[in-house]
């Protein structure tokens, strides 16, 4: 195995990254060393690669980044039980403290002391990765690595969809990026009524149709909120899943929401968003929910059930695969938005 490995490193603050030899991480008593077989690029990785204000505030350098992965256990620490070399695994990317009030009351996904794999802890764009044993998630051996590595973002979609009642309800997924596309399929699998997908990218809208959207709306060609109201007989949409983070799209989502409906917010706006609370939320009696990460570990078990019983199929979502040495090409494609999910095969 040797003492070093190839890893994609954010060496210092600023745009870009470097593929270089780095030490193979050491496995502590409560950790697991994993031979990485597939990783995928997340929107967060784009923020890190381009180095925006969020990255400046949040990201540790130098550091191997990347947090969506699947692989095979190479070694386990002396205190680890129930995990063995040869197991196929992924991992929850949020490393919660385990002792704060949030953690102790079943809300570890909002632990204020969270360290994040690949952001301010070493990540997975490398040949090997180390993570806490409590974060490790077992995968079935017949689940392809290029799909198994998508479970972290899939968890965002599952938590968003299942944050409230969904059966038979009309659903608008605003922002047909990878997580929005997953949300379309999850909503369909969980018994939603009419599913609308809203975006301005024709390729992403085509993918939304492939993932099961009943109607796609190009927000660059019409008023999305007006169109959603027209399609629902003027009532508005029962469930709005906001995945874009675009300020106008967020406002449109609240306008399109039906009275007594639900708005789940996953997309992260770059700055403050102005809303008319009286008209758009209070007098409508809306339920508004912020969604971050995955509920640990309820969401993981929910998505396992969907994946393993083939209620959902993420295959159409993976539009491109690369080897890690082609990272510049992969990140350029991701930034251009002319793709679904991009996977590195290790």
Image: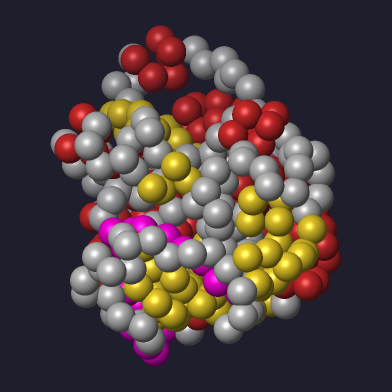
Residue drawn at (29%, 21%), measured in percent from left and top? 285
Which span is picked out in magenta? 127-143
Where residue 293 appears, as percent x and y from the top left, is 41, 46
Residue drawn at (63%, 56%), measured in percent from left and top? 64
Q: For residue 288, what is the image quadrant?
A: top left
Where residue 256 appears, as percent x and y from the top left, is 48, 33
Q: Is residue 222 left or right of residue 69?
A: right
Q: For residue 267, what is the image quadrant?
A: top right
- In the image, is residue 17 above or below residue 174? below
Question: As drawn, which residue projects farthest toward the top?
Answer: 278
Residue drawn at (58%, 83%), measured in percent from left and top? 1
Where residue 203 appears, as percent x and y from the top left, is 71, 62
Q: Is residue 36 left or right of residue 148?
A: right
Residue drawn at (72%, 50%), measured in percent from left and top? 10
Residue 53 in view: yes
Q: Is residue 324 left or right of residue 294?
A: right
- In the image, is residue 219 above or below residue 64? above
Q: Is residue 170 magenta?
A: no
Residue 221 in view: no
Q: Quadrant of the C terminus?
A: bottom right
- In the image, is residue 78 above or below residue 45? below
């Amino acid at each position: 195995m040797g003492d070093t490995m190839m890893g994609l490193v954010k060496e210092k603050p600023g745009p870009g990254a470097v593929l270089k030899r780095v030490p193979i991480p050491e496995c502590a008593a409560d950790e697991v060393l994993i031979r990485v077989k597939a990783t995928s690029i997340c929107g967060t990785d784009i923020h890190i690669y381009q180095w925006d204000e969020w990255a400046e505030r949040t990201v540790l350098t130098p550091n191997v980044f990347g947090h969506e992965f699947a692989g095979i256990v190479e070694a386990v620490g002396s205190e680890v039980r129930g995990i063995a070399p040869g197991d196929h695994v992924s991992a929850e990317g949020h490393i919660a403290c385990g002792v704060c009030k949030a953690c102790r009351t079943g809300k570890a996904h909002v632990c204020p002391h969270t360290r994040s794999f690949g952001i301010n802890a070493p990540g997975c764009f490398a040949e090997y990765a180390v993570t806490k044993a409590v974060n490790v998630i077992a995968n079935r051996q017949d689940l392809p690595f290029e799909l198994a590595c998508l479970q972290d973002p899939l968890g965002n979609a599952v938590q968003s969809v299942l944050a409230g009642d969904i059966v038979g309800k009309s659903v608008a997924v605003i922002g047909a990026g990878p997580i929005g596309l997953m949300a379309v399929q999850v909503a369909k699998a969980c018994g939603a009524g009419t599913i609308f997908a809203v975006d301005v990218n024709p390729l992403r809208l085509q993918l939304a149709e492939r993932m099961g959207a009943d109607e796609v709306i190009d927000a660059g060609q019409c008023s999305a909120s007006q169109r959603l109201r027209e399609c629902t007989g003027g009532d508005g949409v029962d469930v709005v899943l906001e995945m874009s983070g675009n300020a106008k799209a967020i406002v449109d989502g609240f306008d399109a929401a039906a009275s007594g409906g639900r708005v789940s917010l996953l997309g992260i706006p770059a700055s403050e968003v102005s809303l008319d609370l009286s008209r758009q939320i209070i007098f409508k009696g809306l339920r508004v929910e912020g969604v971050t990460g995955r509920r640990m570990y309820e969401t993981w078990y929910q998505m396992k059930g969907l994946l393993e019983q083939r209620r959902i199929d993420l295959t159409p979502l993976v539009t491109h695969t690369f080897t890690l040495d082609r990272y510049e090409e992969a990140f350029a494609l991701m930034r251009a938005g002319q793709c679904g999910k991009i996977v590195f095969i290790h």
